[in-house]
Amino acid sequence: MNLRLHRQMIKVAKTADRAYLFENMPVKRAVLKQIIPAVFSQIIVLIYNLADTYFVGMLNDPIQTAAVTVSYPAFVMLTAISNLFAIGGASLLARSLGQKNEKKAKSVSVISFWGGLVCAVLFSLLFWLLAAPVLHLCGATAETYDAAFRYSKWVIIIGGAGTILNVLLSNLVRAEGNAVMAAIGVTLGGFTNIILDPFFALPQFLGFGAEGAGMATAISNLTATLFFLIYICARRKHTIITISPRHLKDTPKYIAGIISIGIPSAIQYALTVVSVAALSKFVSGYETAAVAGLGIVKKLDQLPLYFSIGVANGLLPFLAYNFSSGNQKRRHNAFVFGAAISFVFSILCLVCYEAFAPVLTGLFIKDAATIAYSSKFLRIMVVAMPMMSLCYPMIIQFQAMGKVRESLICSILRKGVLDIPLLFIMNTMIPLYGCMAVQPIVDGISLVAAWYFYQKINKSMAITNATEPVNGQNE
């Protein structure tokens, strides 16, 4: 009896902590508590995404390096699937908590988990059956296919479930208000990958090459997934998140709400593959050094991109909770503060990239022609960063509110709808360099659309600039 009472008291205390974070903690402190671990997680993801390319590149074997490059689009599709349930599930879970509906929150978590797992298994099986046409479509040749398949076998077929569930579970844990634990799980997976990559890939150790890098990625994602599963099981008396199949009975009731919110994120990631491939195709019509320069720029622009994604992911639970609980002033102030952090960081990157473009691109290669191309490309494409830094929080805001139409429109404006037609127009007007101006243009258009939608939503809810101070607490 005493033990049961003790457990009940702990559960009440945890609920009170979550309520204080989302409802009463000073806005700036609460937002920072959510976004700092989320940004840190994204930087770790950025580092270990580059780890495979870096350590395989140390082999000085173009075939091994090509294997990683060719497999990347299929790997991004795993991220798209994970976001279908991760973003949709996290948004609906946080909104359920804002409505004080813990039963619904539990159902959402278990539906998201099993939905993600089923889709992961199906995608891995489909890729296994269609590996040859898919990898050849992604650029594999007779010379590189074997190495590409061996790498993909581990990353997508064997490790696909780990990749999807790692992202999904970290978002659900963060949505409950435990951003630090979400960051610990992601970081554990990242460090595991970085440690195992050289051990499996390099000839002075096991020497499996690209296949070894794939092994490291699969093991690291499965390790992170195992961490989250152990955490959920160990805290089952005190956490809303559950994977117990008995809650699946509510699937017909909530699955549409999860998927509808997750679809814009999934589509945006999927269209990113198409967009990057189209840009690469245009640039491939010029010198090889231009293609290499574009590859370097796409690595450099990931820093502000991943930072903005981290800010947006950290904001999502806070925005969703306060939206559903009816505290629109607190939601609005949190969004403004988070978006300002994202914007300021992007401006710092803009200044540094414009000022030191040749130095930064020279860190990746010593070829003068490639440095010249990449420096010019970077200085054009970096203009998109401030707009991109606001677009991501805006889109996440719509997803937190359950605004499917607005988030979908802004997502597809950024990738897939405008950028490919503009590539033809800009490349004709300004050969090669016009292609680099496409992203700033589409981000600008997407931001204008997002701002219009946001103002319209705020007006409908009577949110004005005369809101509570962001350092204040709710009355």
Image: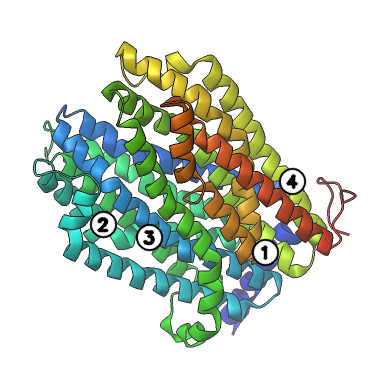
Classify mark 4: helix, strand or loop.
helix
Q: Can you see residue 224?
A: no
Question: How many C-alpha atoms fall within 10 Å of the one at disc 1: few (<14), some, or many (≥20)?
Answer: many
Q: Amino acid at mark 1?
A: Met
Give the residue number, with chain letter if any, for mark 3: 164
Q: Is residue 123 above or below residue 50?
A: below
Give the residue number, with chain letter if any, for mark 2: 156
- For the residues marked 2 and 4, what is the alpha-carbon distance in whole angstroms? 38 Å
Classify mark 1: helix, strand or loop.
helix
Q: Are marks 2 and 4 in contact (CB under 8 Å)?
A: no
Q: Residue at x 11, y 37 (%)?
A: 207
- For the residues marked 4 and 1, what is the alpha-carbon distance in whole angstroms? 15 Å
Give the residue number, with chain letter if any, for mark 4: 336
Q: Residue at x 42, y 44 (%)?
A: 45
**Which sits in the foreground, 269 or 400?**
269
Question: How many C-alpha atoms fall within 10 Å of the one at disc 3: few (<14), some, or many (≥20)?
Answer: many
Which callout, 2 or 4, points at the residue further toward the start of the chain? 2
Question: How many C-alpha atoms fall within 10 Å of the one at disc 2: few (<14), some, or many (≥20)?
Answer: many
Q: Quick one: quadrant of the C terminus?
A: bottom right
Q: Are marks 4 and 1 in contact (CB under 8 Å)?
A: no
**Which sits in the foreground, 401 or 431?**
431
Question: How many C-alpha atoms fall within 10 Å of the one at disc 4: few (<14), some, or many (≥20)?
Answer: some
Q: Amino acid at mark 2?
A: Ile
Q: How many marks?
A: 4
- For the residues marked 3 and 4, what is the alpha-carbon distance in whole angstroms? 30 Å
Give the residue number, with chain letter if any, for mark 1: 401
